[in-house]
Amino acid sequence: MTAALEVSGLHAYYGESHVLQGVDLAVGSGEAVALVGRNGAGKTTTIAAIVGFLRPRAGRVLVNGRDLTGAPPHRIARSGVALCPQGRRIFGDLSVRENLALAARPTTDGWDEARVLELFPGLARRLVVRAELLSGGEQQMLAIARALMRNPALLILDEPSEGLAPKLVGDLGAALLRLRATGLAILLIEQNLTLATAVGQRVQVMSKGAVVFGGTPAELAAARDIETRYLGI
């Protein structure tokens, strides 16, 4: 079966700074993969290179078997990749319903307003509220719901727990597990290791612009040297 995402030998720079140094990772169809690492490890830069915000200088990015290396963001989005960005980036002056409608890309039996509200029922009571008036947790749920409205084949989540209280992180994790159960391919970039290992069926660890470990959450937990050296645990 064709993987939802295959990244191989990815190198990327900011100016003359060599940030990504041969990144390899993959997300299978229907699989959830967590990408973890300390600040500055290269996680967000990896996402930027995948979705077209940063053009890699070497390597390949395949989305559902199609080579989209260096393609512009709109083409990658049309290929079935949806990004829920770090910082949420919702439209604060629009209502919840308007944020969802703006992103909608209807498909038969796909994600629509009713279905995303089943996943995030708290938003159902806030449909006519401006997004800037939502709590941080509600804004994060809206950002994910908006990405789902594009009916992606691959959902990329960049630091979704950032700034959330522990209880809200738990609620987020439960929602992501329900989402994983739908069979959607997910790439989760996350510093919260507890959340990452709860959601990810496989975990990739980044350090200094390269993936230094890949395995199941149980295999990571058994690799104490990896956790100590690269994650500071």
Image: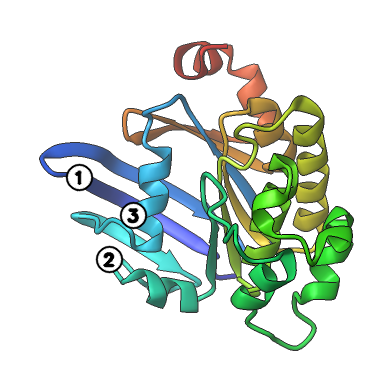
Q: What is the quadrant of the C terminus in the image?
A: top right
Q: Is residue 34 or residue 127 the one in the foreground?
A: 127
* Distance from the alpha carbon under mark 3 to that under mark 1: 10 Å
Residue at x 62%, y 42% (from the top left corner): 160
**Is 199 on the left-hand or right-hand side of 49?**
right
Residue 119 quadrant: bottom right
Residue 153: percent from left, percent from top? 61, 70
| Element type at mark 1 | strand
- Decide: is 31 above or below 4: above
Residue 109: percent from left, percent from top? 80, 83
| Element type at mark 2 | loop
Disc marking residue 89: none
| Element type at mark 3 | helix
Look at mark 1 in the image and give the residue it sits on.
13
Q: Are marks 3 and 2 in contact (CB under 8 Å)?
A: no
- Residue type, label 1: Tyr
Look at mark 3 in the image and give the residue it sits on.
49
* Distance from the alpha carbon under mark 3 to that under mark 2: 7 Å
Ranked by sequence position, the earlier of labels 3 and 2 is 3
Crowding near the residue tagged with mark 1, few <14, some 14–19, many ≥20 C-alpha atoms within 10 Å:
some
- Decide: is 184 above or below 191: below
Residue at x 34%, y 54% (from the top left corner): 49
Crowding near the residue tagged with mark 3, few <14, some 14–19, many ≥20 C-alpha atoms within 10 Å:
many
- Residue type, label 3: Ala
**Residue 31 shows up from this direction:** no
- Residue type, label 2: Gly
- Decide: is 224 above or below 34: above
Look at mark 2 in the image and give the residue it sits on.
70
* Distance from the alpha carbon under mark 2 to that under mark 1: 13 Å
Residue 63: percent from left, percent from top? 46, 69
